[in-house]
């Protein structure tokens, strides 16, 4: 499929339209299996360069939605659309254009980085896999610099990296293909506060300087409010809020949002060297 570079009919880069997903619950082999709805008519659009937070408690359906948006799983109803094309599971070749446009940052970089590979080989790997014809060495240097790592890291292996350095390598691997959008699954979890602030700055800079959009998935609204202009709250598989972040914090429209804001404020106040919580 050629990379057409056009937008969806509503002007968005990525559109999620009335997505439904069910899971079949385990039970005795003779019984009719019960089904539970994990996504319920989920719709939203992501426009070029937007910084969006997708928040919800554990079990809200964030991972289920992410897997559909990445074309790793098939919806029971509804669509994911990018550049006017339906996104669904397919061969690596068929999805190559999409992987160039939309990249994924995993939750646990340490376990997603092949321990046998050097940082240089790890960052080069998506360029090779996606058959990107460019000066690979120059792209690798550029990506490393964008995440604030010096060239001395190129020869290191994952077990020679701290958690924050490994996360920056994971981000470098995602941006080396020059995507339009990053889908990041809890990218700050497991990092201390200074490193969280550093990675937040890296993601902000990528947005300002390279125009890369972000869908940041997190259960923690304190992370979302530092980075994202718009916040979507997912609750029991359905979107209950989709609003500008300051507005959501000023006047939350749902009791489940208030609970998430209270939890986020609690995280901040219990943290050493906590910075002021911007919207409370
Ligand atoms: N394979 C499965 N079998 C049964 N239930 C499942 C399966 N996968 C997901 N679920 C259920 O679907 C719901 C949504 O799960 P999902 O992992 O998408 O939530 P989440 O918001 O990502 O949670 P977390 O923040 O803990 O990762 C949960 O109730 C979960 O128990």
Image (cartoon, grey):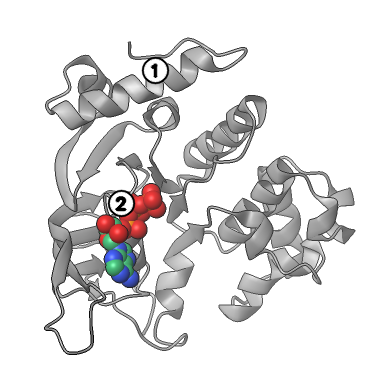
Closer to the camera in the image, 207 or 106: 106
- Image location (x, y in percent) of residue 86: 23, 75
Question: Where ligand 1 lies, by image quadrant?
Answer: bottom left
Is 175 above or below relative to 130? above
Closer to the camera in the image, 166 or 15: 166
Q: Which residue in the structure is indicated by mark 2? A: 59
2 or 1: tag closer to the N-terminus: 2
**Beta carbon at label 1 within 8 Å of ligand 1:** no
Q: Which residue in the structure is indicated by mark 1? A: 265
Is 137 above or below relative to 172? below
**Beta carbon at label 2 within 8 Å of ligand 1:** yes
Is label 2 in a helix, a strand or a loop?
A: loop
Q: Is residue 50 left or right of residue 256?
A: right
Is label 1 in a helix, a strand or a loop?
A: helix
- Image location (x, y in percent) of residue 247: 21, 21
- Image location (x, y in percent) of residue 41: 10, 59
Tell me if I can see residue 196 in this picture: yes
Q: Is residue 54 left or right of residue 81?
A: right
Query: Can you tell which quarter of the image residue 150 is in?
Result: top right
Crowding around mark 1 (Cα neighbors within 10 Å: few <14, some 14 to 19, many 20+) is some
């Amino acid at each position: 499929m050629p990379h057409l570079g056009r937008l969806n009919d509503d002007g968005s880069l990525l559109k999620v339209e009335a997505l439904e997903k069910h899971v079949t619950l385990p039970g005795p082999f003779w019984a009719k299996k019960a089904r539970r709805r994990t996504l319920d008519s989920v719709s939203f659009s992501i426009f070029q360069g937007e910084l969006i937070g997708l928040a919800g408690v554990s079990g809200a359906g964030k991972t289920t939605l992410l897997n559909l948006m990445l074309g790793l799983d098939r919806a029971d109803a509804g669509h994911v659309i990018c550049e006017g094309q339906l996104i669904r599971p397919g061969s690596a070749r068929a999805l190559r254009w999409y992987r160039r446009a939309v990249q994924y940052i995993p939750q646990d970089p340490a376990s997603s980085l092949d321990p046998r590979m050097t940082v240089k080989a790890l960052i080069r790997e998506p360029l090779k896999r996606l058959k990107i014809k460019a000066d690979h060495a120059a792209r690798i240097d550029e990506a490393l610099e964008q995440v604030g790592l010096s060239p001395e890291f190129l020869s290191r292996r994952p077990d020679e990296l701290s958690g924050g350095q490994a996360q920056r390598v994971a981000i470098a691997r995602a941006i080396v293909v020059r995507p339009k959008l990053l889908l990041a699954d809890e990218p700050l979890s497991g990092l201390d506060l200074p490193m969280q602030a550093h990675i937040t700055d890296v993601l902000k800079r990528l947005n300002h300087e390279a125009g890369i959009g972000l869908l940041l998935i997190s259960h923690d609204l304190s992370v979302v409010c530092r980075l994202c202009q718009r916040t979507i709250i997912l609750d029991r598989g359905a979107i209950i809020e989709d609003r500008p972040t300051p507005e959501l914090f000023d006047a939350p429209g749902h009791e489940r949002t208030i609970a998430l804001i209270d939890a986020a404020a609690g995280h901040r106040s219990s943290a050493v060297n906590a910075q002021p919580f911007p919207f409370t």
